[in-house]
């Protein structure tokens, strides 16, 4: 499905820009404003999370043409899913109590991405570029 392909590339680029905003925000202030807009606007957070869930499902069941019917775009799908979980973690991060510590998959994924934000951002950018340049390559 070509629409899901294009939206997944844009979603991966958005995620890479969000993750790399700390490192490149001084040179590109729009990255900082993009992250600020995500953190301050509730509707943007909900939209990004819902689109991420839909894209994960579309990438898993409807990959580009030569790929297998199920899990054809595995690496972009996993990356989109991890970005969606990270965005969900960021959106509820302020709502949880400071003294209460939750051990869940959402919390663990969010903490991992927070600690390795730079590397995950570059990895997401590489996956987005490869997914854009070689759309019919089955990235497993």
Image (cartoon, helix red, strand yellow):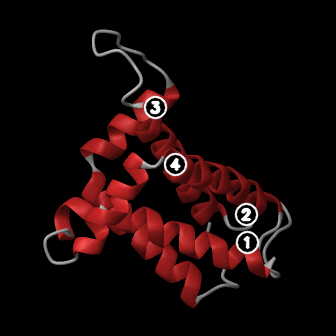
Circle number at residue 71: none
Whole-number angstrom distance, CA of label 4 to CA of label 3: 10 Å
**Within-10-Å neighbours for mark 1: few <14, some 14–19, many 20+:** some
Few, some or many residues within 10 Å of mark 4 (<14, 14–19, 20+): some
**Residue at image mark 3:** 92
Q: Residue at x 34, y 40 (%)?
A: 112
Between disc 1 and disc 4, whose residue precedes? 1
User: In this figure, which residue is indicated by the disc labeled 2?
Assistant: 59
Percent coordinates x, y for residue 51 in the rendering: 66, 57
Q: What is the C-alpha distance between the residues marked 1 and 3?
A: 27 Å
Residue shown at the point (39%, 47%) measured from the top left: 40
Which residue is disc 1 drawn over? Answer: 4
Q: Earlier in the sequence, mark 2 or mark 1?
A: 1
Above or below — where is 123 with respect to 90?
A: below
Front position among marks 2 and 3: 3
Instruction: Between residue 1 and residue 96, name the one nearer to us.
Output: 96
Mark 1 vs mark 4, CA separation in Å = 20 Å
Q: Position of residue 25 (x, y in %)?
A: 20, 68
| Dots 1, 4 in contact, CB < 8 A | no
Crowdedness of circle 2 by 10 Å Cα count: few (<14), some, many (20+)?
Answer: many
Counting residues from the start of the chain, the first of labels 4 and 3 encountered is 4
Q: Is residue 138 visible?
A: no
Circles 2 and 1, Cβ within 8 Å, touching? The answer is yes
Query: Real-space Cα distance between discs 2 and 1?
Result: 7 Å
- Residue at 48 percent of width and 82 percent of height: 129
Q: N-terminal of the two: label 1 or label 3? A: 1
Image check: 87 left or right of 72? left
Q: Secondary structure at mark 4?
A: helix
Give whichever of discs 2 and 3 has the lower sequence position: 2
């Amino acid at each position: 499905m070509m629409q899901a392909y294009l939206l997944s590339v844009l979603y991966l680029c958005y995620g890479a820009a969000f993750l790399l905003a700390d490192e490149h925000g001084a040179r590109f202030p729009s990255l900082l404003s993009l992250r600020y807009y995500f953190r301050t606007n509730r509707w943007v957070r909900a939209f990004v999370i819902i689109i991420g869930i839909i894209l994960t499902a579309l990438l898993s069941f409807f990959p580009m043409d030569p790929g297998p019917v199920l899990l054809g775009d595995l690496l972009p799908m996993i990356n989109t899913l991890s970005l969606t979980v990270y965005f969900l973690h960021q959106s509820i991060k302020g709502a949880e109590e400071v003294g209460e510590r939750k051990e869940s998959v959402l919390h663990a994924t969010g903490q991992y991405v927070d600690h390795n934000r730079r590397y995950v951002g570059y990895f997401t950018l590489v996956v987005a570029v490869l997914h854009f340049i070689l759309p019919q390559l089955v990235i497993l």
